[in-house]
């Protein structure tokens, strides 16, 4: 018997999560649609049928991050209470399978469901706006669905990798908090998150001003060209970014796995 | 088989629960785990189930280190805690979700237990009383047909008919291949069922013996007056005089009274321990 991963056990865990929470998931889906509908209706200029992209984009990001983190916390809600944790830890499946189930819901199911629901509402409002424009015979550009805006706007497209990376960090951090804390795990995770942000901010400041600044000064004193100094600065910043948004989620997820493995109730 | 070797466990420096505990529990027995509040009964069961990890020593069940919580180990052990969680689904849905994890689960057996407890699998857990939920979980636990069955205070919350149904059912599933460990305060409820008896106190096992061994070495009787105080290990007032526990030096036949035994063990630690080692 494979004690690390078995697809049958994994699919049973996926099923278990769905059956036990399907009502809540469906209610949350209506919630997502409701929130985006309310937001879109507030943004839309009904008299002209136009709907501005930038506020929609900001609302999209806020909902994606906030609702995503709540969902990620909920995925491991079984571990935040002694009784449900006992039941969860004794389900005959490996820690790895239980961990993967959490990842599957937090990193696959949530984004797919969220993007689908958000864009369904978005396209609905875009069509309503365009119909108003058409009926009023307003000349000008048609409203675009948010995804078209995101992929056609150069600045937004450039940011996309960083946004996904940052989202991964938040999701991984919340998952870790859900496994680590017992009771009110979301609030505790948010609190620790703020403390971590302050520390990271301080480290960035120290790294940028003291270490990088000193290095660049040395380069300048040695008479290197401004071009080289700029390139070096960009290089270090890129390394920092890669560490923060790609390596950090991995470290957080590995930590979450071991926390789950060592969980005692 | 459950083997506990040199197991120490604590909840921090100030709360030592076990110190170098050694215990072997074999198949074909329904062990009764007794001890006062905070003696570590639940902690011991949780160590056996792999929910708590020893600070020292090891706990091995069916050849697996319980701390690893491997699927192969988990599918042959079922732990019913005193306070439990039930999802807000129908009993049938619960069985559909969890039964496939246990290869020896019998749906037929489960439905029979439900019938015995006058429950239906169409009922929703949220609509059941605590006792009914417990009965459904007891039925599920027994239907998993795991080699090891751990139950923490299983009769708490059960009504009088359910307690006798519970005894009947447990007696019917106590096979030669199975180890059943029941932790309880309600010794009267399970007196006829549990054998051997394990008494925990002061971070150690004070007694681990079958009722036969107990009655060989101890005598339980009711007397009108207590005369030979030196030989009496424990005495208490009863309706007909005094219920006493004495050393059985003359091979007298008596029926083990678990409540008296428990009190005698707690008041006479060293003597009882000496007798049974």
Image (cartoon, rainbow, N blue to C red):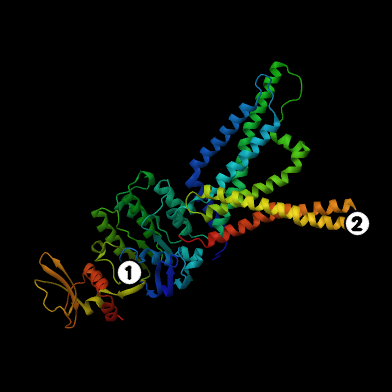
* Same subunit, tags 1 and 2: no
Residue A34 figure quarter: top right
The answer to the question of whether label 1 and label 2 lie on touching residues, with beta carbons closer than 8 A, is no
Question: In the rendered image, which quarter contains the N terminus of chain A?
Answer: bottom right
Q: Is residue A218 visible to the viewer in this orientation of the structure?
A: yes
CA gap, disc 1 to disc 2? 83 Å
Question: Which mark is on residue B60?
Answer: none
Residue drawn at the location 50% of the way across and 43% of the way down:
A22
Q: Is residue A107 left or right of residue A133?
A: left
Task: Give above or below for A161 relative to A120.
Answer: below
Q: Chain of mark 2?
A: A
- Report which residue position mark 1 lands on: B31
Give A79 or B190, whichever is nearer the viewer: A79
Q: Nearer the viewer, residue A87 or A60?
A: A60
Residue B50 in the image, given as x and y percentages of width and height: 46, 65
Q: Residue furthest top?
A: A136
Q: Position of residue B107 (x, y in %)?
A: 40, 55
Residue ID for mark 2: A223
Left or right of residue A200: residue B63: left
- The image position of residue A15, as x and y in percent, is 52, 50
Residue B99 appearing in the image: no
Residue sitting at x 32%, y 69%: B31
Q: Is residue B228 left or right of residue A217?
A: left
Of A88 and B114, which appears nearest the observer? A88
Tell me the quarter of the image containing the C terminus of chain A: bottom left
Give the chain of mark 1. B
Residue A29: x percent and y percent? 55, 38
């Amino acid at each position: 018997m494979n004690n690390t991963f078995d697809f049958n056990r994994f699919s049973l865990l996926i099923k278990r999560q769905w059956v036990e929470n399907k009502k809540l998931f469906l209610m949350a889906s209506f919630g997502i649609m409701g929130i985006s509908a309310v937001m879109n209706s507030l943004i839309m200029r009904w008299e002209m049928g136009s709907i501005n992209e930038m506020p929609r984009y900001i609302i999209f990001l806020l909902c994606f991050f906030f609702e995503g983190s709540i969902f990620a916390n909920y995925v491991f809600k079984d571990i935040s209470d002694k009784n449900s944790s006992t039941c969860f830890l004794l389900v005959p499946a490996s820690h790895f399978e239980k961990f993967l189930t959490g990842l599957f819901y937090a990193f696959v199911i949530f984004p797919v469901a969220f993007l689908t629901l958000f864009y369904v509402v978005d396209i609905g409002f875009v069509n309503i706006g365009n119909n108003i424009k058409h009926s009023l015979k307003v000349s000008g550009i048609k409203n675009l669905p948010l995804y078209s805006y995101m992929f056609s706007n150069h600045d937004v497209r450039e940011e996309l990798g960083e946004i996904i990376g940052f989202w991964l960090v938040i999701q991984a951090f919340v998952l870790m908090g859900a496994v680590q804390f017992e009771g009110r795990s979301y609030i505790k995770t948010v609190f620790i998150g703020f403390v971590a942000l302050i520390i990271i901010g301080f480290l960035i400041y120290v790294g940028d001003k003291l270490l990088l600044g000193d290095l660049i000064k040395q380069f300048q004193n040695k008479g290197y060209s401004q071009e080289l100094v700029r390139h070096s600065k960009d290089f270090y910043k890129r390394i920092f970014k890669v560490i923060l948004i790609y390596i950090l989620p991995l470290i957080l997820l590995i930590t979450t796995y071991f926390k789950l493995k060592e969980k005692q109730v | 088989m459950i083997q506990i070797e040199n197991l120490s466990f604590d909840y921090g420096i100030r709360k030592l629960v076990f110190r170098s505990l050694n215990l072997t529990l074999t198949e074909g027995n329904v062990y009764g785990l007794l001890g006062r509040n905070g003696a570590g009964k639940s902690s011991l069961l949780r160590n056996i189930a792999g929910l708590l990890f020893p600070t020292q020593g090891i706990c091995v069940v069916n050849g697996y280190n319980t701390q690893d919580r491997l699927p192969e180990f988990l599918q042959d052990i079922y732990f019913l805690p005193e306070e439990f969680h039930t999802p807000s689904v129908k009993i049938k849905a619960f069985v559909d979700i969890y039964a496939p994890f246990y290869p020896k689960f019998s749906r037929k057996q489960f439905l029979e237990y439900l019938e015995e407890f006058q429950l239906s699998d169409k009922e929703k857990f949220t609509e059941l009383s605590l006792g009914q939920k417990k009965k459904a979980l007891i039925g599920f636990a027994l239907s998993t047909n795991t080699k090891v069955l751990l139950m923490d205070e299983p009769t708490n919350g059960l009504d009088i008919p359910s307690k006798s149904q519970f005894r009947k059912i447990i007696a019917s599933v106590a096979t030669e291949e199975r180890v059943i460990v029941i932790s309880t305060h309600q010794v009267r409820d399970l007196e006829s069922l549990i054998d051997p008896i394990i008494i925990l106190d002061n971070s150690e096992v004070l007694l681990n013996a079958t009722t036969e061994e107990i009655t060989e070495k101890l005598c339980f009787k009711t007397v009108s007056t207590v005369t030979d105080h030196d030989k009496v290990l424990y005495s208490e007032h009863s309706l007909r005089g005094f219920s006493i526990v004495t050393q059985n030096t003359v091979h007298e036949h008596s029926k083990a009274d678990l409540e008296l035994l428990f009190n005698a063990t707690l008041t006479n630690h060293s003597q009882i321990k000496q007798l049974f080692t």
